[in-house]
Amino acid sequence: MGTAKARHILVASQEECQKLKDQIDGGADFEEVAKEHSTCPSGQSGGGLGEFSPGQMVKEFDEVVFKDEVGKVHGPVKTDFGYHLIEITDREE
């Protein structure tokens, strides 16, 4: 089924998530925004999650990472943890 590499930003509200996405779409650096705003420990390293396979992340996360366009920032994506912006950096089929 393949693997993917992604980074993400996790925040508590859909509003905040959308605001951060607008900043990134407007040219803000994903890693800097992650370091400043993400509530996930991965935020300290720019949101990087490394390489993973389907089933290692929550379902809503997998659906984006293994189906949507690589190199784009997707979201807000709601999970039990909060709202994510997800950037798929690489995917191998």
Image (cartoon, helix red, strand yellow):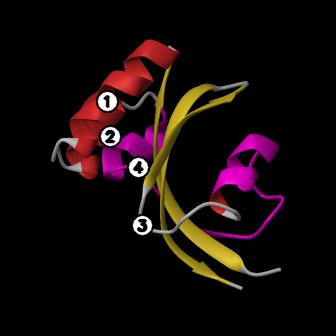
- Report the amino acid beneath label 3: Gly
Give the residue at mark 3.
71
Q: Is residue 29 something one can see in this rendering?
A: yes
**Whole-percent x, y for residue 55 in the image:** 84, 59
Query: Which residue is most to the left?
Result: 27
Q: Are marks 4 and 2 in contact (CB under 8 Å)?
A: yes
Is the residue marked by circle 3 packed among few (<14), some (14-19), or many (20+) residues within 10 Å? few
Mark closest to the chain's N terminus, 4 or 2: 2
Q: How far apart are the alpha carbons under marks 4 and 2? A: 6 Å
Query: What residue range appears in magenta?
Result: 40-64
Q: How far apart are the alpha carbons under marks 3 and 1? A: 17 Å
Q: How far apart are the alpha carbons under marks 4 and 3? A: 15 Å
Q: How far apart are the alpha carbons under marks 2 and 3? A: 16 Å
Give the residue at mark 4.
47
**Whole-percent x, y for residue 60 in the image:** 75, 42
Image quadrant where residue 83 sits: top right
Residue 68 position (above or below residue 59): below
- Report the amino acid beneath label 2: Ala
Q: How far apart are the alpha carbons under marks 1 and 4? A: 13 Å
Residues 54 and 42: in front is: 54
Q: Are marks 2 and 3 in contact (CB under 8 Å)?
A: no
Give the residue at mark 1.
20
Mark closest to the chain's N terminus, 2 or 3: 2
Q: Is residue 24 toward the left or the right of residue 59 in the image? A: left
Image quadrant where residue 24 sits: top left
Mark closest to the chain's N terminus, 1 or 4: 1
Give the residue at mark 2.
34
Residue 88 position (above or below residue 74): below
- The nearer-to-camera label among 1 and 4 is 1
Please check the rendered image and state whether residue 51 is part of the magenta-colored stretch, yes or no. Answer: yes
For image coordinates 73% across by 54% down, the residue present is 62
Q: Secondary structure at mark 1?
A: helix
